[in-house]
Amino acid sequence: QVQLVESGGGLVQAGGSLRLSCAASGSIFSINFMGWYRQAPGKQRELVAILGSSGSTKHADSVKGRFTISRDNAKNTVDLQMNSLKPEDTAVYYCYATVVFTTHSGEYQYWGQGTQVTVSS
């Protein structure tokens, strides 16, 4: 099985920066998409940014120009550099990956446990 382990969450003042990291472990052949979702209290989970293995990216409009996603395919890690943070960015951030195995056909979806990001005004 695959585990996604997140790190880097915490408390930061508005205008500050945080860097989230996620490492995938397990018998992984390849990771297709890898990225980040977030969920604020009372809100639905939403895509923040995601990066395909070929380099394609997609960001939420609310974070474009402030957040940058990057991957290290050799290490099966993904980072999210968050700059110019706003109180509205406060949420639990979840790592997400779609994984291909040598022993199973198809793609499988995995989620991290979530890490809290709190931005104070």
Image (spheres, grey):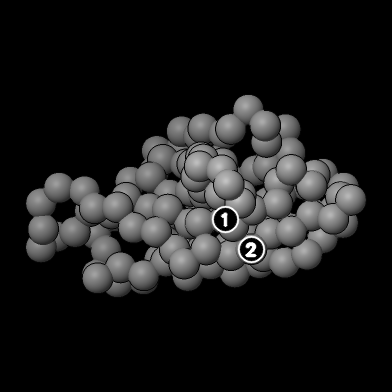
Residue at left 79%, top 54%? 119
Pointer 2 residue: 116
Q: Is 106 located above or below residue 22 in the figure?
A: above
41 sits to left or right of 50:
right
Q: In the rendered image, which quarter is residue 49 located in? A: top right
Badges 1 and 2: C-beta atoms under 8 Å apart? yes
Which disc, if any, is residue 45? none
Q: Which residue lies under the disc numbered 1? A: 93
Q: Is residue 86 above or below residue 5?
A: above
Amino acid type of the residue tagged 1 in the rendering: Tyr
Secondary structure, mark 2, is: strand
Image quarter (top left, top right, bottom left or bottom right) of the N terminus:
bottom left
Residue 106: horizontal and vertical position, in percent? 15, 47
Q: Residue at x 24, y 53 (%)?
A: 108
Q: Residue at x 59, y 57 (%)?
A: 92
SS of the residue under disc 1: strand
Chain-order first, disc 1 or disc 2:
1
Can residue 23 be seen?
no
Q: Is residue 98 above or below residue 62?
A: below
Q: Which is more toward the observer, 94 or 25?
A: 94
Name the spot of residue 120 as percent of width and height, x first: 85, 55
Closer to the camera, 94 or 59?
94
